Amino acid sequence: MPVHVIDSGNLTMAEGLIVLAAAQAAHSGATEQKILDIIEKAIEKSQAYAKLDTVDYLQRSGRLSNIQHGIISLLDIKPILRMNNHLAKMDIVRTRKKAFARVVETAKQMAPNASLFGITHANVPEQVEELLKQLKDAIPNLKEPMISEVTPALGTHVGPGALCLSWLPE
């Protein structure tokens, strides 16, 4: 069986969505080259959008310096990370409530055009329930997303309270 090593350029559920797109193509009888093309296009299109409640774990893992951590904590900044095609960008808001509202608004924009989407969380099932409630109110024919908890390896970097949307547009 041929093996191809591929860097998805993304994280968590978004990586899984790329794999699902490839598996669907394989299941429908696509050739090896066609599957690789689908993977390449899925990598370019897949998105992950994650809000973090704390930056303590980013500091502990060496992803933030003590100075950066101090400034972010002092200003009560909540980072929102966007990953796409090997690029990471960061938005910032000032409170948990505003960060959650930004995630909800992003979900409302992307969900209607997503062929696949999912939600990953770090010990905040109540936020997932509230997000789904608001999405279903705004989008009556909403497809059910895949829902998962972060893995311990990722959890050591993002900490409790992280909430991530991942999607693959049509």
Image (tube, helix red, strand yellow):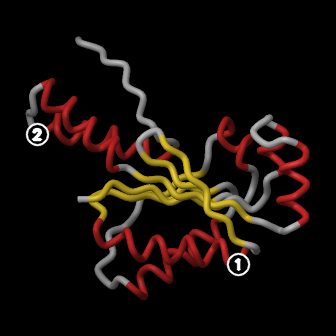
Tell me the kind of residue under disc 2. Answer: Ser
Tell me the kind of residue under disc 1. Answer: Lys
Q: Residue at point 67% right, 55% down?
A: 122
Q: Looking at the picture, tell me which residue is in the foreground, 34 or 134.
A: 34
Q: Does residue 137 appear to the left or right of 66 in the view shown?
A: left
Q: Which residue is mark 1?
A: 97
Question: In which quarter of the view is residue 135 placed?
Answer: bottom left
Where residue 79 appears, as percent x and y from the top left, is 69, 60
* Sequence-wise first label, 2 or 1: 2
Q: Which residue is mark 2?
A: 28
The label shown at residue 76 is: none
Q: CA distance from mark 2 to mark 1?
A: 43 Å
Q: Does residue 129 appear to the left or right of 29 in the view shown?
A: right
Q: Secondary structure at mark 1?
A: helix
Where residue 123 appears, as percent x and y from the top left, is 70, 58
Q: Looking at the picture, tell me which residue is in the foreground, 45 or 12.
A: 45
Q: Looking at the picture, tell me which residue is in the foreground, 83 or 138.
A: 83
Q: Are marks 2 and 1 in contact (CB under 8 Å)?
A: no
Does 41 appear above or below 114? above
**Which mark lies nearer to you, 2 or 1?**
1
Q: Secondary structure at mark 2?
A: loop
> Label 1: how many residues lie within 10 Å, few (<14), some (14-19) or many (20+)?
few
Of the 4 image quadrants, the one containing the N terminus is: top left
